[in-house]
Amino acid sequence: MKTIKLLPALLIALSLIGCKEKQPDVVTDEVIEETVVKAIPRASDTYFEQAINAYENADKVEAKKKIDAGIEALDKESKDVSGLNKANLDMSKDQLRNIASKLDGNFDISVEGLKEAIANAEINIAHNYLATDDVYVLTPKARLRENYLQNALDYNLKSLEAGTSKLTGEARIEGEKLGAEGKKLKEEFEAWKKRAEDHAKRADEHFKKHQTEYSNYDRVYAM
């Protein structure tokens, strides 16, 4: 959303004719009205909003259709996107395709997970919002930063692998060192994700047996 200040029509008119007739200086205590104006959503925003609405109305077929249309619109809107933003966008589109595939199989998904995947995609093509029933939803900053760091690691590793061999001397040594460190970090991160996934499943099994009110694995990880 963008917040702008609306000037009274009289002031606008005076500014247009000021070059023809000098106006006296006027001191006024008039309070300028402040209002909130929503930016016009792009095609992808509209399709994704419709997808969320469809799923919330138990229409998985329509939700899947709108997600597919949103991805296609993203492809057109991101033609000038490159570098890390493109890498991030591609990963987000893969998430959206995965969600659409689950819907196609009549599986339930996480609405929050869908919104997060959409927001992550949109933010990489300069969309700073997602319209859902007149409410603009952004991915929480902490989660967005986590996603950025993971995507940055993948992008940097590919870049180091492609570029380091072209360097010489200390620059090449530094590039090789960064590449080795990055690969180790990725291995550690992937191992951590597997341990965290296993822990989440075992904890949820415990909750289902003893404290069902805390069971949320299926909801949180449905995407």
Image (cartoon, rainbow, N blue to C red):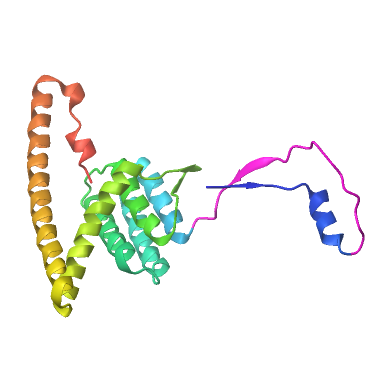
174 lies left or right of 1 = left
Q: Is residue 70 visible?
A: yes
Q: How many marks?
A: 0
Residue depicted at 19% across the width and 74% down the height: 163
Q: Is residue 141 left or right of residue 197?
A: right
* Residue 214 figure quarter: top left
Residue 40 location, x and y as percent? 54, 55
30 over 84 or under it: above or below: above
Whether residue 84 is situated above or below residue 129 in the rendered picture = below
Magenta segment range?
20-41
Q: Which residue lies at the image location 20% right of the left edge and 41% below the top edge?
A: 221
Q: Position of residue 150 (x, y in %)?
A: 22, 53
* Residue 91 lies in the magenta stretch: no
x and y, in percent, of residue 25 in the image: 87, 48
Q: Return the residue nearer the eye: 143 or 37.
A: 143
- Which residue is located at x 15 percent, y 62 percent? 178
Looking at this view, is 158 or 113 the one in front?
158
Main SS, magenta residues: loop
Instruction: Identify which residue is drawn at 25% across, 55% down.
Output: 95
